[in-house]
Amino acid sequence: MDTLPPPDSGSAAVPLTSRQLRELYSLMVAVRHLDSSAVAWQRQGIIPGYAPELGQEAAQVGSGYAVDLARDFVFPTYREMGVARAMGVDMVAYMATHKATWHGGLYDPIESRLAPIQAVVAGSVLHAVGWAHGQTLAGRDGVAMSYFGDGASSQGDVHEAMNFAAVMKAPVVFFVQNNGWAISVPADRQVAGGSVAARAGGYGIPAIRIDGNDVVAVFEATRRALAHCRAGNGPVLVEAMTYRRGPHSTSDDPGRYRSLAEERDGAGADPLERFRQRLLADGTADEAFFAAAMADAKAEEEEIRAGIQALGPRPGEEMFSLVFQETTPVLQAQAAIWREESEHV
Amino acid sequence: MSNAIVESGATVRHGAEEGGPGENGREQLSMQQALNRALDEVLAESPKTLVFGEDCGRLGGVFRITDGLQAKYGETRVFDTPLAESGILGMAVGLAMAGFQPIPEVQFDGFAYPAINQIVCQIGRMNYRSRGTLPMPITLRVPSFGGIRAPEHHGESLEALFAHVPGLKVVSPSNPHEAYHLLKYAATRPDPVIFMEPKSRYWQKDGVDVSHGGSPTGAKVMRPGRHLTLVAWGAMVGRCLQVADLAAEDGVDVEVLDLRWLKPIDAETLATSVRKTRRAVVVHEAPLTSGLGAEVAQLITQGCFDTLKAPVERVTGFDVPYPSGDLEDEYIPNIDRILNGIQRVLEYRRG
């Protein structure tokens, strides 16, 4: 499905260079390795929990790579590590949320162009619409990227967001990763009609449904969507069809709701391996490059793990001082009692 | 917070010609006019301010609080939204993240319920979650409380619900003067404020001194007295002032404290008043159980236990769904019920 008009200018249709293709691959390897390592960190007691994105590397890296960090702003869920990495977010600061250091992560949202990690399903979709409308009001050409999944598409806020965005012609890309599962509930028992993209038509929003495991297709669709929004044409919906190959979180047990055979059939070909074969086939990269990318990914993961392990708890004072911009006497009094009684004086 | 203001003349009901400055520099304005003027001035003073909600634009709001503002400031600054409260508040979050100062409206108190997820999980927490990098300078205007024979869900008192949410501040004006100054103050704060407007007072005129508002924070003594403190907010302040007049005829000198800020509560001014009068009755429209009256009573007990002559009494709505118009006078604390509450406290004997 593709109801998005072709781009006005050629800029959104320029093929990726070999350097960019290799960069996408390196990012996917880094994300794959960090993601699987984070599951291991949880098993080793380094972090208390993690929500893996195994299998969604192409959808996340391809879309995050298309974001213009000078203008756009991204609204993630709690499963957007690949997007964050592709955007160049400080990964120790990002993974700090999974270390239980600070809910929203420790990165600066303004600098990194990534809103704080959002734990409410569909919680930030409306924020993207508001931020996007703000660009219109301020005469700027930034685009909001709103990430959510097939499960979140059931939330009423998604309807409100798509309706508001269409009425106001807000420059927002609704980027849906349909990974087939909302914890234990499959998409066919979640998404009536079978397609989130099909719903966009009801709002008059153009939509593209793509192979979310093809990183180049994801990048190109996202780039087109961003260009459409940036040109003042209103919102776009991209539905990237992918598969959550791992558990919902490190506390989940997919064996209770899907068999290994179902998992294998549903997941299809591994997006990373697919891309590797393609780069090999067209001569864009060779085995030496893949080996180097893997070595870089390992070095990066070790550095991030060291950073996470070195990360101590935030000062308890921040519980109080970060609630408001202008604190209240009541909160100050509670902080004083906490300091005294917890012997943090 | 030590900013009690004794305003013996707070209930000026005489003097000025309509619309013009009267004696003591006061203008006679309805609360609707006072709120409208406050919004007008905030829009003029800060280009980052936006006013929006259902019917806030062309119509000027169902209560006309935003009357004329779209014509004056244009459709980008004052606009109608689709009819969905979660959308309005969720959008306000994004606009705040983009650097704007949103002043959204939910048309009636009961319509805040569909937006609770955004108010509680997002507006109240974004500053904290983002470690202070994404402040939420959102002032949510909520026409509140009962008393106008309205349909179901148009007469709710949500202050205890909002006050319980970390990250929110809550305020309610009791008269046009307070409405003007508190809205101007709230709308220029960097934190989210739930602004509860007593809709039954929208059309009552009273003196507004636009150039002398006094402190915009804390509670305010609206009438000094010696024998007992009536604590109230919103529409109940006016009723308590009436009660105080009636009690005076029986020689009971009642102090009326307008709490104004329901979060944070000005515990110091509350204690100062009750340490003097040694008796207190809290009056609110919301249901009794877990109402804000319980919080107020505890703060008084904490601050005045040694000198209290009687347990703090509560005169409130009942633990029932807000009733139909025919029964709302049975529900909202009336003069007789407040006088009875006063009597129970005055007649209380230990043992």
Image: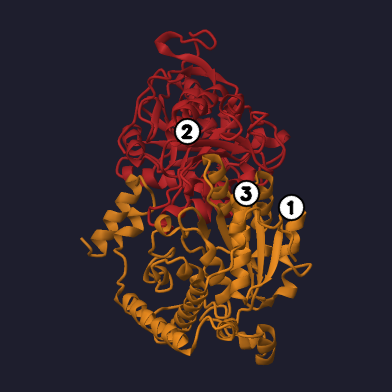
Chain colours: A orange, B red
Q: Secondary structure at mark 1?
A: helix
Q: Amino acid at mark 3?
A: Gly
Residue B199 is marked as none
Seen at 64% across and 28% down, the residue is B60
Q: Write down the chain letter for disc 3.
A: B
In three-dimensional space, the C-alpha distance between marks 3 and 2, rounded to whole angstroms, equals 23 Å
Residue at disc 2, secondary structure: loop
Percent position of residue A140, x then y: 52, 44
- Sequence-wise first label, 3 or 2: 2
- The residue where tag 2 is placed is B47
Q: Quadrant of the C terminus of chain A?
A: bottom left
The residue lying at 57 percent from left, 78 percent from top is: A248
Above or below — where is B145 with respect to A226?
above
Does the residue at mark 1 contact the one at mark 3 (Cβ under 8 Å)? no
Asked whether disc 1 touches disc 2, contact meaning CB atoms under 8 Å apart, the reply is no
A122 vs B244, left or right, is: right
- Residue A118 coordinates in the image, percent (x, y): 51, 63
Mark whose residue sits in front, 1 or 3:
1
**Number of the label disc, if any, that sits on residue B87:** 3
A274 or A205: nearer the viewer: A274
Disc 1 marks which residue? A203
Q: Is residue B143 visible?
A: no
As drawn, the residue found furthest toward the bottom would be A261
